[in-house]
Image (cartoon, helix red, strand yellow):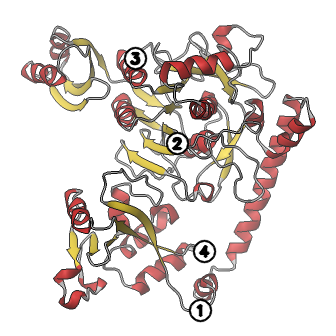
């Protein structure tokens, strides 16, 4: 089985977010969160599902969720 | 309350801040805690006049197990009898007693800003009530550790003195005061605050909401007593900052005009409303999803200035760009750290809709670690003195993380000067008002951020 990854879907704002969400779910994307203020949908899917999601109307971008790190409390520069 | 606890004593305190805890249990926990706090760890929520029923329901909808004093004969609700209830409501007086754990889980804080349409009037810590005499003496008489308090105080005093001496040395060598007035202010504030000409500003950020998305905050830090603080976590940990990065950044952006004790001024927008979004764990790490959640929250709350001292060494991410655009569309401004890799500006600061902040040394030269390329503005980032969680209280850190809240604080002061200075206009004003520096724009952008 292919590996599930976390993705952030950026939308154009030209389609209702609920429609984009519905289309994503139908394409096999597991939606974890819909961030209405900033027009993003976060969820999990395999690579091929994410690839198909890029073609859904209203989807601008599908990117893997990046890690963020500021280092430990005693880091010399933070 | 969690903010008064050491981690090892957490379990003891947690069991003592239930609504059903006896006074003896709570008192014992306070003595073991070893501070002079009069807080029991529980909270009292006061509802607005005539809104007690609505308030009772609102606690229920927040998932609290609520006991009602009316369930008891003559409403003589014995606290020991309410079992595992999270809250006990006294409808007659429009007040609810909430356990420390339940309050902490919902990020209730004493200074929480309550929405206008909320049935809640205020949230206050429940205090011990003593008979005549000094409550401090009362606690110490029960405590074998009482004598340690003065030692702790002296150690803290020495630490603060060293920090001030260090800061003044840096400040003096960096900035040659040009007038007598500036010389006076230089003695009372950090080098960074002076370089941004904050002490000369008459603004304080009142009415401006500043969100700091970071590792949370020490919600009980004495320099923030009485401040309007709204907090929310997005990483599955309490907002209480066990890292120190978030408390340090909030200190610079929103810290007090006159800190407690002999401490130089280190904060800028000292009357702004503070929105604490915990998007980084206590280990200082996170994922973009949590960060985006915090950005969504800050924008939904219409925070005029959103400060993000975080990132990763990646190219521009469409999702951060979209979030920055949403902020600008709503008249809000996001400022972010350029990064400390001595390389190209990282994400999210490299998004065109987010203002990238570079770091300056006390000599006003770009810091060696500071990223370059897409840089809009620069600010003090080396050897920055600010607040850190108790018991240490103050500390010095370096990085573009420290430069960013200098810009956020100054942005709040500018926003106070005119309701037109929001979003893109605020972005442009900060750049236009910046002090030009003789370094390439790729290193320092428009120059050193200045207060109005």
Q: Are marks 4 and 1 in contact (CB under 8 Å)?
A: no
Q: Are marks 3 and 2 in contact (CB under 8 Å)?
A: no
> What's the chain of the residue with tag 2?
B
Q: Is residue B427 visible?
A: yes
Quadrant of the rendered image containing residue B31? bottom right
C-alpha distance separating marks 4 and 1: 17 Å
Label 2 or label 1, whichever lies nearer to me, is: 2
C-alpha distance separating marks 2 and 1: 40 Å
Residue B232 picture location, percent across and down: 39, 46
Identify the mark at residue B207; answer none if there is no mark: 2
Say left or right for A62 vs B166: left
Helix, strand or loop status at disc 1: loop
Residue B206 picture location, percent across and down: 57, 43
Label 3 or label 2, whichever lies nearer to me, is: 2
> What's the chain of the residue with tag 3?
B
Disc 1 and disc 3 on one polypeptide chain: yes
Residue B73 picture location, percent across and down: 18, 90
C-alpha distance separating marks 3 and 2: 27 Å
Q: Which residue is mark 1?
A: B132
Q: In terms of sequence position, does the residue under pointer 2 or pointer 1 come before the other?
A: 1
Q: In terms of sequence position, does the residue under pointer 3 or pointer 2 come before the other?
A: 2
Q: Which residue is mark 4?
A: B36
Closer to the camera in the image, A10 or A65: A10
> Which residue is painted at 35% across and 32% down in the image?
B296
Residue B275 picture location, percent across and down: 46, 43
């Amino acid at each position: 089985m292919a590996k599930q990854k976390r993705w952030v879907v950026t939308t154009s704002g030209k389609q209702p977010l609920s429609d984009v969400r519905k289309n994503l779910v139908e394409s096999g994307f597991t939606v974890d969160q819909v961030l209405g203020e900033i027009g993003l949908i976060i969820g999990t899917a395999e690579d091929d599902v994410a690839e198909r999601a890029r073609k859904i109307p209203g989807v601008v971008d599908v990117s893997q969720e990046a890690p963020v790190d500021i280092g430990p409390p005693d880091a010399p520069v933070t | 309350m969690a903010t008064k606890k050491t981690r090892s004593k957490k379990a003891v305190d947690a069991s003592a801040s239930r609504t059903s805890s006896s006074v003896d249990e709570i008192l014992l926990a306070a003595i073991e805690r070893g501070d002079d706090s009069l807080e029991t760890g529980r909270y009292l929520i006061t509802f607005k006049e005539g809104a007690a029923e609505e308030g009772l329901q609102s606690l229920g909808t927040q998932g609290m197990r609520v006991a009602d004093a009316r369930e008891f004969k003559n409403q003589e609700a014995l606290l020991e009898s309410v079992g595992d209830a999270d809250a006990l409501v006294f409808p007659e007086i429009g007040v609810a007693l909430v356990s420390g754990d339940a309050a902490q889980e919902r990020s209730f804080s004493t200074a929480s800003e309550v929405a206008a349409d909320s049935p809640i009037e205020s949230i206050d810590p429940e205090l011990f009530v003593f008979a005549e005499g000094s409550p401090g003496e009362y606690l110490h008489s029960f405590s074998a550790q009482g004598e340690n308090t003065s030692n702790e105080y002296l150690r803290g005093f020495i630490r603060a003195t060293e920090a001030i001496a260090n800061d003044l040395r840096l400040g003096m060598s960096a900035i040659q005061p040009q007038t007598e007035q500036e010389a006076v202010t230089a003695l009372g504030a950090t080098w960074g605050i002076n370089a941004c000409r904050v002490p000369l500003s008459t603004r304080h950020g009142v009415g401006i909401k500043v969100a700091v998305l970071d590792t949370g905050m020490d919600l009980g830090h004495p320099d923030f007593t009485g401040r309007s603080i709204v907090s929310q976590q997005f990483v599955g940990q309490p907002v209480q900052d066990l890292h120190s990065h978030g408390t340090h950044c909030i200190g610079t952006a929103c810290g007090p005009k006159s800190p407690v004790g002999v401490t130089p001024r280190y904060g800028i927008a000292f009357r702004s409303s503070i929105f604490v979004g915990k998007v980084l764990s206590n280990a200082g790490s996170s994922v973009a999803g949590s960060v985006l959640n915090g950005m969504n929250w800050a924008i939904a709350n219409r925070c005029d200035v959103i400060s993000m001292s975080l990132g990763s060494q990646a190219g521009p991410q469409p999702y951060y760009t979209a979030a920055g655009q949403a902020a600008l569309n709503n008249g809000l401004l996001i400022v972010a750290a350029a990064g400390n890799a001595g390389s190209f500006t990282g994400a999210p600061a490299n998004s065109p809709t987010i203002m990238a902040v570079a770091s300056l040394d006390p000599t006003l030269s770009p810091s060696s670690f500071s990223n370059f390329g897409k840089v809009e503005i620069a600010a003090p980032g080396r050897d920055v003195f600010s607040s850190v969680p108790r018991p240490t209280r103050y500390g010095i850190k370096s990085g573009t993380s420290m430069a960013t809240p200098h810009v956020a604080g100054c942005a709040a002061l500018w926003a106070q000067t005119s309701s037109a200075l929001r979003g893109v206009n605020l972005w442009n004003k900060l750049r236009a008002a910046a002090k030009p520096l003789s370094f390439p724009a790729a290193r320092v952008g428009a120059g050193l951020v200045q207060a109005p």
